[in-house]
Image (cartoon, grey):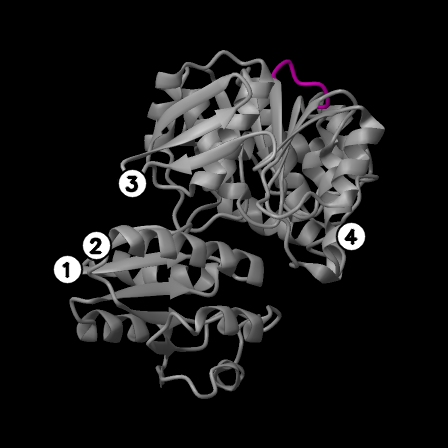
Amino acid sequence: MLTAPLATDDLQTWLDYWGHVHVTGIDLGLERVLPVAEALGIMRPNAKVITVAGTNGKGSTTTALAAILNAAGYQVGLYQSPHIYRFNERVKLAGQEVDDQRLIAAFVQVDQARRDCELSLSFFEATTLAAFLIFKQQQCDVWVLEVGLGGRLDVVNVIDPDVAVITNIGLDHIEWIGDTIEKIAFEKAGIIRPNIPVVFAGSQSLPVAIQTKVDTCQASLAAYNRDYFTEMAADGSHWYFAAPGTTLKLPIGHLAIENLAAAIAAILVSGLAVSEQAMAQGIQAAVLPGRFDVRRIAQQTVIFDAGHNPHGVEFLLNQLEKFLQYNEQYTEIVAVFSMLADKDIDAVVNLLKHRILTWKIAALAVPRAAEISQLQSALTDETVAQYENIQVAFQSALAETKNNQLILVCGSFHTLEAVWEYLEACQ
């Protein structure tokens, strides 16, 4: 049997341990998790729980929810995945990452509970239960939970939400949760419970699977562009949220308006008391690296976006069109680009190529990286420059980009991470 680390061991030792306890990294299903969650006493939190599922937009929506509720004075526990730099990013209290010792203390308890139940847990299951234990111990008023994969069989779904939010649905992780929009929607709809409010924040038509689950559960549904709406002010200085009996004038934040609106809609149906001022403060404070993340670097404008599937890239392009509408000095785009081999590279390139002047590509330094030949094949007939790694590709973009050009770093979180590591090293 694998020997457990000690409470005095460091966080990385514990994370390595959780990576080896279970035979597979992804093992959907709640059979093993439920007894451990029950033993930990986290199944029925004395808190309002808002759970967010979806293919794209989950991270932005949960970030916005937590920021607004923090601004309103609630003690908020925010759980998200994956992380970018540090594991601690996944678990936040009052907007701050939890420290190593608090995580380790929770890991010790989770490990003891799973041993008492004579069960193994995957990395994601164990670390998620630890986050929930921390929220319980800190007596958080609100738990904001981002589903990892799917919804119905994801460990986050051991907790019954008071509000369920489903963002955009697209084709991703098809080997795990289905190869059609309706199959994937069925899995996402698994977070819906009887008689709770549900927000469908997708800009697409409402999937039948979600409506069916809403009807079965006699839940109430608020759908984007049917029950609540957004409109940008003509001068781009603010935006409006509108629902029956409610019109809010809100500031432009760092995140996409569609996701900010999803957060507002969820708060309005939650029963939580939140002022318009707190909504405005939260919107301005909500920041999530890699989601249409606009920065000035070495006198150049750089946009980082982690969209890695066709639906995510469509969303990126919509944000890009809005940005260019108010920044007319930019007429050309240089892409620093790479992807993972198991993603739909051809579809992503086909969506982006009408907007990209030059592609600067390199293979990622991760196990699932697409080979350079795979990237080249998708970029036939495009203007492409190939580099030994993403950092060198980005250096080239910074050095060569003209005043009328902006740099778009995209294709994968790993692409963004490589550039961010380079920028950190330069400081």
Task: State the CA–CA distance, disc 2 to disc 4.
Answer: 41 Å
Dot 4 or dot 3: first in sequence order is 4
Crowding at mark 2 (Cα within 10 Å: few <14, some 14-19, many 20+):
few
- Corner quadrant of residue 58: top right
Residue highlighted by disc 3? 236
State the residue in front, 381 or 160.
381
Which residue type carries mark 3? Gly
User: What's the CA distance linking mark 4 and mark 3?
Assistant: 38 Å
Q: Secondary structure at mark 3?
A: loop
Q: Which is nearer the N-term, disc 2 or disc 3? A: 3
| Residue 69 image position (x, y, % from top left) | 45, 21
Q: Secondary structure at mark 1?
A: loop
Q: Which of the two discs, 1 and 3, labels the residue nearer the N terminus?
A: 3
Q: Which residue position is annotated with label 1?
A: 299
- 283 with respect to 22 (left or right): left
Number of other residues with Cα within 10 Å of mark 4, as a class: few under 14, some 14 to 19, many 20 or more:
some
Q: Position of residue 383 (x, y in %)?
A: 36, 84
The C terminus lies in quadrant: bottom left
Q: Position of residue 132 (x, y in %)?
A: 61, 28
Most foreground residue, 84 or 13: 84
User: Tag 1: residue type?
Assistant: Gln
